[in-house]
Image (tube, coloured by chain):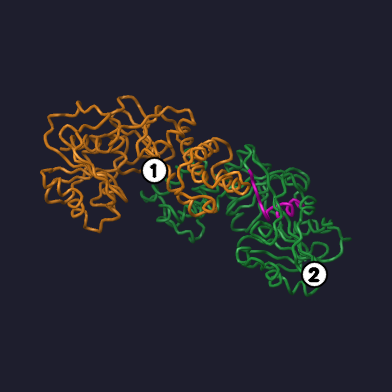
Chain colours: A orange, B green
Amino acid sequence: MFLPGYDNGAARRERKGVMIGVDWGTSSLRAYRIGPDGALGGTRCLPRGILTVEPGGFAAMLEEIAGDWIAAGERRVLLSGMVGSRQGWVEAPYLPCPAGLDGLAAAAVPAPFAAAEVRVLPGLSCRDAHGVPEVMRGEETQILGAAAAIGPQEATVCLPGSHSKWAQVKGDAVLGFRTHLTGEAFAALAGHTILARMMDIRAPHHPGGFARGLARARQGGGLLHHLFGLRAAALFDEMEEAEAASCLSGLLIGHEVAAALEEGVAPPVVLIGAESLTARYGEALDAFGVPHRTAPAHAAARGLFLAAERLR
Amino acid sequence: MFLPGYDNGAARRERKGVMIGVDWGTSSLRAYRIGPDGALGGTRCLPRGILTVEPGGFAAMLEEIAGDWIAAGERRVLLSGMVGSRQGWVEAPYLPCPAGLDGLAAAAVPAPFAAAEVRVLPGLSCRDAHGVPEVMRGEETQILGAAAAIGPQEATVCLPGSHSKWAQVKGDAVLGFRTHLTGEAFAALAGHTILARMMDIRAPHHPGGFARGLARARQGGGLLHHLFGLRAAALFDEMEEAEAASCLSGLLIGHEVAAALEEGVAPPVVLIGAESLTARYGEALDAFGVPHRTAPAHAAARGLFLAAERLR
């Protein structure tokens, strides 16, 4: 099986060997068995994020996750994500932007493991226009994997989530990026303010409520004022309980997208992430009239494969 | 004792009788014994907000709070705040803006009480430029009390808090107002996101951190991006733990003030509230170059007295 959407023919066929790639995050991980041409031989998504690993337990956890693949002959393992943080297996210091696949590969840090050669990719850092630092771990591998399907022109890649990332990419380099605390702000505000009384964060997505939040985000008054407006609308029976959480989501995502557009993006914006979330960001970009498309699946696997090709 | 800062001589001396005023909020209350000229005869601040009152228990609670004053001859009690909400003693429906002391007095709702005449003032409502509803309960009495010291020109009154209010006032009427969920957002974000790991919300105020947050709020990128920047700065050892909570406070207050200024204010902005909070908002307004002053103390007592004068 080849990675859909990527030019698999362009993979350097002369590189011998097969590999295991793991996008190892805080609360979960995704492991890939990847063939010599970048073909995907297997995918595993497990709730074995680094927070579930006891100190000193990373080698044993890798055995548990991919021991059968290693026993079957895999000798190269490349890891990305929080596994390279201070709380991870080995620390791989942040690589400053601009940075691409060559830089990531050169900065990979070996991890002690008997049965295979294990390396950990660094995350990326940059500074915004005002000198405030920015960091990512794991997203860079997805972004550079997706960049392989974008082409040489400058592009904006958006990865929605607890800490949403908006990256500027050109060729195979990440020029810089910005993070928004959107997902975490949603959970904190929906769960721990007066808004909690009017919403159920497990309620199904409500398209009308989401669109209402997006529209509100485009009005003046500021986010903190808009948040109170949700509460007041409920007091006046102008906000149904079924739409409240989706409205808050639309409000926050709308503010995130508005801020990102103000800073400048290169459309079409390329979205990477779970379908449920990229669909929402697509609706938000539609509301702002910005073209967008979704990156091919398994961008992380593609990024890990392309970085592994550059090792040594 | 006369209310400092107000023209007590202008109080209608011919009104006979003394009164009790209570600004009765959600979690606490402030009770005032007020003489015939508006002179303040006693103040009590108690943690007896409406959430501490069992259904049907308001009369007994008033006895507990001010029974000695009533026994000593007070026969008129005027209440403002959440005590007039659906969860309070009797519901006093919101009065739409513009509204002043005459309107508030005319809309006061009697509450059943044997030993004195008890009335509950309504809160105010309005709509912002986009039709979204707004509500307040209790602040209107403080605002109209302070307005007595402002004069006939249009003014902006700001009451910082969990739900900060910015009201436009002219003469003795509230023209309209806006609420920002700033205080609640601070508690939710500081306590229930990744920011919780880097800050102690009980840390003493850190002027440098607060100023840093204010400055950040004036830069581009949006609030959700600025929130992540706090975390990233800590990762790079560019944010001391001692300043982190004050920096978040400055960031949120800065965003609130920026949004309020964008909507338009009439300086000097008049601040009402606890000194610790109005001082912070004063620093924020200074950072934006907006003149401000603090309302005389006991604005609620003044408002309750002036409204009581207009009863019947």
At label 1, the amino acid type is: Gly
Left or right of residue B155, residue A36 in this image: left
Q: Chain of mark 1?
A: A
- Is residue A304 depicted above or below A65 in this figure? above
Q: Chain of mark 2?
A: B
Q: Give the residue furthest to the right.
A: B14
Residue B308 image position (x, y, % from top left): 80, 59
Left or right of residue A5, residue B177 in this image: right
Q: Residue at x 60, y 38 (%)?
A: B262
Q: State the count of labels.
A: 2
Q: Are marks 2 and 1 on the same chain?
A: no
Q: Residue at x 23, y 38 (%)?
A: A304
Q: CA distance from mark 2 to mark 1?
A: 60 Å
Q: Residues within 10 Å of mark 2 (few under 14, many from 20)?
A: many
At label 2, the amino acid type is: Glu
* Residues rendered magenta in the picture: B133-149
Q: Residue at x 30, y 32 (%)?
A: A296
Residue A151 image position (x, y, % from top left): 30, 25
Q: Which residue is mark 2?
A: B74
Q: Which residue is mark 1?
A: A161
B28, B145: nearer the viewer: B28
Circle 1: element type: loop
Q: Is residue B141 magenta?
A: yes
